[in-house]
């Protein structure tokens, strides 16, 4: 039955590949389900729970801490990258999942316990300092989880996939992952229950991820667990990924394609959440985060299910790399024009920003993510794990931190409405400039990848 359902939507996937990629898709479902739930929770906890007015904080304290916390995250991720790079040399690929996911399971279980105490005994019982650092640590942990676990999953998947398998199966993996993100996001729509049970769900997803990888490795034949590109063996080198980035122009191009969208995306995300924070109270803000998560991931799911395979097959990787930046540019121009028209109110501008973010996130997850992962097919193991780890973890977080710093710079302390005006006016123009550079890099990487795949050359 499962085989029939998979082949109905993805007829190009071969029967002997279905079990392998179904298990990978389930693992990705748990990964993205946990990440999206925690991603929405990090904003809820920081904006509304970590700085309670009852303990002397002002109502806008959490929103102002968001750019600061995001600016710290690259330094946290740098430490994670160094540890991750060392672990790649010491352990088998699948064991990295058990080590890293177990760490995050313990951390989020502790955070959930603190929020349980806040919900049952009150903020005064936990204390202002403990709540403040719980919010900040939860934010940083979630940022690093989004970098390390997602990067690890795709590094692992790329390392056991051929170029042709990637074209056939990666859209299927992304589609099932969107079910996890939709499910995780939809839990935020429940206004009444306290927040801490959602951390229990996230921890359960991380445990499910480890179980799925373990079953995949135990039941899949060894000849199906490798790529068609022969990987160069190298000596353990903690700085190997950094060396590759600075000596391979192709990987530098992949760095731009894989990270620059995070700068403009973070600016737009801060535009939207700043407006929501001003308009909504705690329960409505939680509901809104759930709506955003379900809507953007629902769109991504529909695209991944019905359109991603067809788009990649019809246009190829080179053209697909251009689709996302162009769609982002068009969306931002439309939003900027609406804002400048003078026809918008606070509510209509908020929902217009919401619509743009939904498109940006939907196209990112459905089209850009699977395509940019294909860029690593003609690369060595060090490029797939070490260089990719740096790009996805440190590069991605640095890009987000840059976007957050731009947003923070445009803030006007004590004047949220002036902050919104600066974000909409100057933030949108800065985003368009960044997208211009991104389009040029996508053009170079797409052409280079096409040549590498045809020649069989390995980078790194």
Image (cartoon, helix red, strand yellow):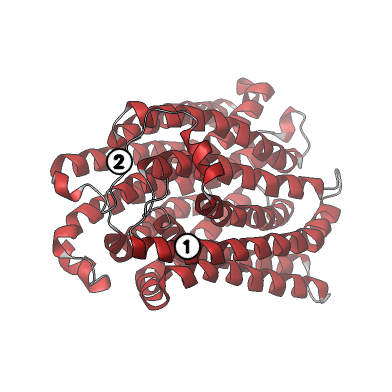
Using residue 174 as the reference point, say whether residue 245 is left or right of it: right
Residue at the spot 42% in from the left edge and 76% down from the top edge? 315
Residue 161 is marked as none
Q: Can residue 349 be seen here?
A: yes
Residue 172 spot, x, y in % from top left: 31, 62
Disc 1 marks which residue? 448
In the rendered image, the quadrant that contains the C terminus is: top left
Does dot 1 land on a helix, a strand or a loop?
A: helix
Nearer the observer, 196 or 66: 66
Disc 2 marks which residue? 208
Give the alpha-carbon distance from disc 2 to disc 1, as whole Å.
38 Å
Quadrant hosting residue 94: top left
Would you place residue 256 above or below residue 134 in this image?
below
Q: Can residue 295 be seen here?
A: no
Residue at the spot 57% in from the left edge and 64% down from the top edge? 360
Nearer the observer, 403 or 376: 376
Would you place residue 213 above or below residue 355 in this image?
above
Nearer the observer, 111 or 391: 391
Residue 143 spot, x, y in % from top left: 55, 40
* Number of other residues with Cα within 10 Å of mark 1, as a class: few under 14, some 14 to 19, many 20 or more: some
Does dot 2 land on a helix, a strand or a loop?
A: helix
Residue at the spot 21% in from the left edge and 44% down from the top edge? 216
* Number of other residues with Cα within 10 Å of mark 2, as a class: few under 14, some 14 to 19, many 20 or more: some
Residue 138 spot, x, y in % from top left: 56, 33
């Amino acid at each position: 039955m499962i085989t029939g359902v998979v082949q109905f939507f993805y007829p190009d996937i071969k029967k002997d590949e279905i079990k392998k990629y179904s298990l990978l898709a389930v693992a990705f479902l748990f990964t993205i389900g946990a990440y999206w739930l925690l991603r929405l929770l990090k904003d809820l906890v920081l904006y509304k729970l970590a700085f309670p007015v009852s303990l002397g904080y002002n109502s806008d304290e959490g929103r102002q801490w968001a750019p600061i916390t995001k600016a710290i995250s690259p330094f946290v991720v740098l430490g994670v990258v160094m540890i991750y790079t060392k672990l790649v040399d010491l352990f088998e690929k699948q064991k990295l999942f058990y080590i890293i996911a177990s760490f995050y399971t313990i951390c989020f279980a502790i955070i959930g316990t603190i929020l349980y105490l806040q919900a049952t005994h009150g903020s005064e019982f936990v204390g202002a300092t403990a709540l403040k650092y719980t919010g900040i640590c939860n934010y940083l942990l979630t940022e690093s989880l989004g970098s390390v676990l997602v990067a690890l999953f795709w590094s692992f998947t790329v390392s056991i996939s051929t170029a042709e398998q990637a074209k056939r199966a990666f859209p299927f993996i992304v589609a099932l992952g969107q079910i996890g993100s939709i499910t995780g996001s939809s839990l935020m729509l429940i206004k009444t229950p306290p927040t801490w049970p959602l951390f229990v769900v996230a921890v359960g997803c991380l445990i499910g991820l480890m179980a799925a990888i373990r079953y995949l490795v135990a039941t899949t034949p060894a000849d199906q667990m490798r790529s068609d590109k022969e990987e160069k063996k190298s000596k353990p080198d903690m700085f190997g990924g950094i060396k590759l980035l600075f000596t391979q122009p192709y990987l530098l191009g992949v760095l731009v394609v894989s990270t620059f969208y995070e700068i403009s995306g973070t600016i737009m995300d801060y535009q939207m959440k700043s407006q929501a924070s001003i308009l909504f109270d705690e329960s409505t803000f939680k509901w809104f985060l759930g709506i955003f998560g379900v809507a953007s991931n629902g769109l991504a799911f529909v695209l991944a299910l019905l359109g991603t395979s067809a788009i990649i097959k019809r246009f190829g990787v080179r053209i697909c790399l251009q689709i996302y930046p162009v769609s982002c540019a068009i969306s931002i121009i439309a939003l900027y024009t609406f804002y400048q028209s003078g026809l918008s109110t606070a509510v209509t501008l908020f929902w217009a920003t919401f619509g743009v973010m939904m498109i940006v996130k939907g196209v990112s997850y459905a089209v850009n993510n699977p395509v940019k992962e294909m860029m690593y097919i003609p690369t060595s193991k060090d490029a797939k794990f070490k260089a990719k780890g740096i790009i996805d973890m440190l590069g991605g977080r640095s890009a987000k931190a840059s976007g957050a710093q731009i947003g923070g710079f445009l803030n006007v302390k004590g004047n949220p409405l002036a902050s919104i005006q600066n974000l909409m006016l100057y933030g949108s123009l800065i985003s368009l400039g960044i997208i211009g550079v991104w389009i040029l890099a996508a053009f170079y990487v797409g052409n280079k990848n096409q040549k590498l795949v045809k020649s069989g050359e390995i980078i790194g």
